Amino acid sequence: MDSLRGGLRRPRAVVRSERVARAVRPGEYRFNPDFLGDRDERQPQCVESAMEGIAMTGMTRLIVGFVLVLVGIAGPAVAADVFSACSKNTTNKLRASSIVVNATAVCKSTETMRTWSDVTLFGTNTNTAVAGNGATCTLGEIILSAGPIANGVAANGQLLMISQRTALFDLIGTLYGGDGVTTFGLPDLRAAAPNGLTYSICDLGVFPSGR
């Protein structure tokens, strides 16, 4: 900053072509003959160099920020998790408390260990178990089975005869399809089932009651 008359101060950076100009307000300049001098002759170069430095610093920050964003999006390669759990031999039901990740489940002598990966965790080779009976279940209950025989009937979105599943029809009606006269539908859970497992619905069991 240089001193002006009356004790005021002016910016060191001035705009010069053939004459020195002083900023009055943004976008307006007036001729200022008071500050012609040798030191002022160097001001445009100083200002230009400073602006170039600021521009380069901003560009460097922009490039670095862009690289960091790309790294954040891609992220490091992560190995797929492997799940392990135990299913009861008589019912093929998975024991929820036995599920572990990247470790071996500790199963009882009456259980079988099952494993699957989260790479394609759901919807592959699912709901292949045939209908069967196991422990008493509640009508409409969804059961996850690991073996070839389900406790109930696989929930594949198929239509069932009302005359053969009257109690289940009374419970879910035509919520999942059917004409409501001779047929009704089951939910289709094939895409939601873990790979190799079966989601079945209890079709012969205890009718639930409200509380």
Image (cartoon, helix red, strand yellow):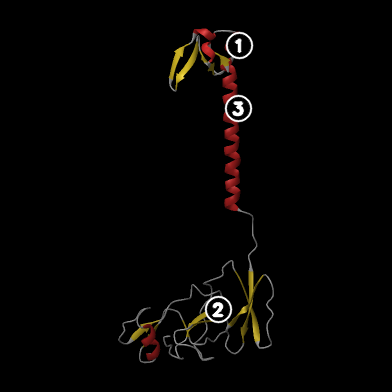
* Picture residue at 69% right of the left edge, 87% below the top: 109
Earlier residue among tags 3 and 2? 3
Residue 79 pos. (x, y %):
65, 62
The residue under label 3 is: 53
Say which quadrant the N terminus sits in.
top right
The residue under label 2 is: 197
Q: How many marks?
A: 3
Q: Secondary structure at mark 3?
A: helix
Earlier residue among tags 1 and 2? 1
Of badges 1 and 2, nearer the viewer stands: 1
Residue 122 pos. (x, y %):
53, 71
**Would residue 157 appear left or right of 77 to someone viewing this image?**
left
* Picture residue at 44% right of the left edge, 13% below the top: 30
User: Residue 77 has which mark?
Assistant: none
The residue under label 1 is: 39
When the figure is inspected, residue 3 is found, relative to residue 165, above or below; the finding is above
Residue 162 pos. (x, y %):
35, 89
When the figure is inspected, residue 132 is found, relative to residue 175, above or below; the finding is below
* Picture residue at 40% right of the left edge, 87% below the top: 168
Say which quadrant the C terminus sits in.
bottom left
**Few, some or many residues within 10 Å of mark 3 (<14, 14–19, 20+):** few
**Would residue 190 appear left or right of 91 to someone viewing this image?**
left
**Few, some or many residues within 10 Å of mark 2 (<14, 14–19, 20+):** many
Q: Secondary structure at mark 2?
A: loop
At label 1, the amino acid type is Arg
Of badges 3 and 2, nearer the viewer stands: 3
Earlier residue among tags 3 and 1? 1
At label 2, the amino acid type is Leu
At label 3, the amino acid type is Gly
Measured Cα–Cα span from mark 3 to mark 1: 21 Å
**Few, some or many residues within 10 Å of mark 1 (<14, 14–19, 20+):** few
Measured Cα–Cα span from mark 3 to mark 2: 63 Å
